[in-house]
Image (tube, helix red, strand yellow):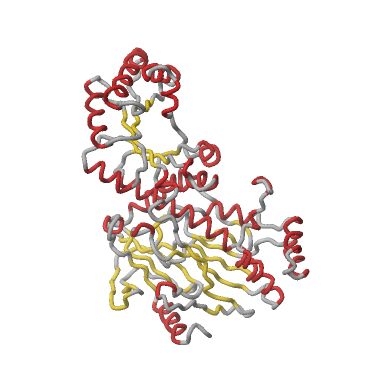
């Protein structure tokens, strides 16, 4: 068995990427330049948008691409690959170009969120890792943003490590949740690696370890007077948990002049119990004591709790966030959109399907976002050919490519390119912002979306338009069954 420390992630690829690579090599396609788009087809949970995440891990992966001697030996043992191809892999590295939207960007179906331009074997080989990174972290960041918006400014912490589907899912899930707007995590290693502030106080086992609930609370307050959040539902929340917490606060914290503390509940009727708890704490003079709750929460449960008048200051959200339980697959795909001839001519490619939703948008493209100058709000996204430019000094008519009769005139707007260079000729040209900057950028960009787009149910459909030139090319390819 290979330990995690010895894993070469270059080998984390679908096997057909290697069989195709060998085929490209044997058929003289090794140096053929290809263009691939990364995009997704629909937003999780029927939402109006998603959040891009996972780029930093892709950058690390691309920088470290290589085949070790033991990898070549394994591939040779399969008796499928030519010696010429295996020799090529011995000196393998990425030499292509990559563009991507920055992490934290709100994204919409069918638009390119990453573009790869590279020789065929290189472009094909990196598909799996790119998709797993974007699909996982974008899914969790999107779910986290929904949960955070439901909390209406209250603190949300990610509590899901023990229910995550593997170590990476816990660690990178906490990172993605932070990008989406969570304030921190229970996952210590995510703090150590990425600076996602980790926190936590006690479990029920702490309370059970002592002879009395009061002794457990008092001891904890003595140990951590400036971080005293007591779990009050081990036995009976209102009859023993809260009275014992208040007693411990009075006997330990009050003489020290400490007024900030907290209680947490993990079971029961949270709306009812939190209202009762708030009343008891306030009457005892602990008006700054925060009430936090956990227990299989999601955006809809949080929304319902607040509509019922729950007195909750902080939410710990675990399994339904870290696994995106309501829709646990993001559905990002990696599709060939063009190939480049020796003379530099770019030939568009399209995938056609009887399922209209699976028809791709061909060609090497740019992606713009239009913002209203009067509101600062995002109006639409606009896909065009790589050599087209957008004039935002006048008016433009755009249409919904899913319904060509539906048009919209945009004016008084500013156009911003969303895809930024990441690698050029195999060299990293992008400096990753720190995670705090990514989170700040995400929340700022989500704020540019209209509330109608941000609805949890039946959100307004955001325009993602094709330029006339791109639309004409797509239609020509469809009429000719995708062949040039």
Residue at 48%, 71% in the rendered image: 365
**Residue 304 x/y as whole percent:** 25, 45
**Residue 209 x/y as whole percent:** 45, 22
Depth check, front residue: 407 or 128: 128
Q: In this rendering, would 89 be left or right of 16? A: right
Q: In this rendering, would 22 be left or right of 216? A: right
- Number of dots carrying numbers: 0
Q: Quadrant of residue 406?
A: bottom left
| Residue lying farthest to the bottom in this orientation | 480
Q: Quadrant of residue 26?
A: bottom right
Rendered view: 69 above or below 156: below
Q: In this rendering, would 332 be left or right of 342? A: left
Rendered view: 447 above or below 42: above
Residue at 31%, 29% in the rendered image: 290
Residue at 38%, 38% in the rendered image: 316
Depth check, front residue: 451 or 423: 451
**Residue 130 x/y as whole percent:** 55, 59
**Residue 327 x/y as whole percent:** 40, 56
Q: In this rendering, would 302 be left or right of 202? A: left
């Amino acid at each position: 068995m290979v330990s995690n420390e010895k894993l070469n992630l270059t080998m984390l690829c679908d096997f057909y990427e290697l069989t195709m690579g060998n085929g490209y090599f044997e058929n003289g396609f090794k140096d053929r330049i290809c263009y691939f788009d990364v995009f997704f087809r629909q937003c999780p949970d029927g939402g109006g948008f998603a959040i891009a995440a996972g780029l930093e891990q892709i950058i690390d992966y691309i920088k470290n691409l290589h085949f070790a001697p033991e990898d070549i030996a394994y591939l040779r043992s399969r008796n499928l690959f030519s010696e010429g191809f295996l020799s090529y892999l011995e000196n393998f590295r990425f030499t292509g170009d990559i563009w991507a939207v920055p992490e934290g960007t709100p994204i919409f179906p069918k638009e390119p969120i990453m573009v790869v331009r590279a020789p065929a074997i290189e472009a094909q080989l990196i598909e799996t890792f790119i998709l797993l990174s974007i699909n996982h972290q974008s899914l969790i960041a999107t779910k986290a943003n929904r949960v955070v918006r439901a909390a209406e400014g209250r603190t949300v912490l990610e509590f899901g490590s023990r229910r995550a589907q593997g170590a990476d899912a816990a660690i990178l899930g906490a990172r993605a949740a932070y990008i989406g707007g969570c304030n921190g995590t229970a996952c210590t290693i995510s703090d150590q690696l990425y600076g996602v502030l980790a926190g936590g106080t006690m479990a029920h086992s702490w309370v059970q370890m002592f002879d009395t609930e009061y002794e457990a609370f008092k001891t904890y307050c003595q140990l951590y007077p400036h971080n005293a959040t007591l779990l009050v539902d081990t036995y009976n929340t209102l009859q023993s948990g809260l009275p014992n917490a208040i007693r411990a606060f009075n006997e330990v914290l009050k003489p020290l002049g400490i007024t900030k503390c907290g209680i947490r509940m993990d079971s029961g009727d949270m709306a009812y119990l939190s209202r009762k708890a708030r009343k008891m704490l306030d009457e005892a003079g602990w008006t700054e004591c925060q009430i936090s709750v956990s227990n299989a929460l999601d955006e809809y449960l949080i929304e319902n709790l607040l509509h019922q008048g729950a007195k909750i200051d902080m939410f710990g959200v675990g399994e339904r966030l870290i696994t995106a339980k309501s829709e646990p697959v993001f559905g990002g795909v990696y599709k060939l959109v063009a190939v480049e001839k020796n003379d530099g001519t770019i030939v568009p490619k399209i995938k056609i399907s009887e399922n209209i939703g699976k028809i791709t948008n061909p060609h090497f493209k740019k992606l713009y976002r239009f913002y209203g100058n009067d509101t600062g709000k995002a109006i639409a996204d606009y896909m065009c050919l790589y050599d087209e430019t957008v004039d935002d000094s006048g008016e433009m008519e755009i249409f919904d490519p899913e319904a060509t009769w539906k048009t919209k005139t945009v004016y008084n707007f500013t156009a911003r390119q969303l895809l930024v260079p990441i690698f050029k000729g195999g060299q990293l040209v992008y400096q990753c912002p720190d995670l705090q900057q990514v989170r700040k950028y995400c929340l700022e960009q989500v704020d540019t979306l209209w509330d109608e787009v941000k609805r949890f149910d039946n959100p307004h459909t955001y325009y993602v338009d094709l330029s006339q030139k791109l639309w004409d090319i797509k239609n020509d390819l469809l009429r000719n069954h995708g062949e040039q």
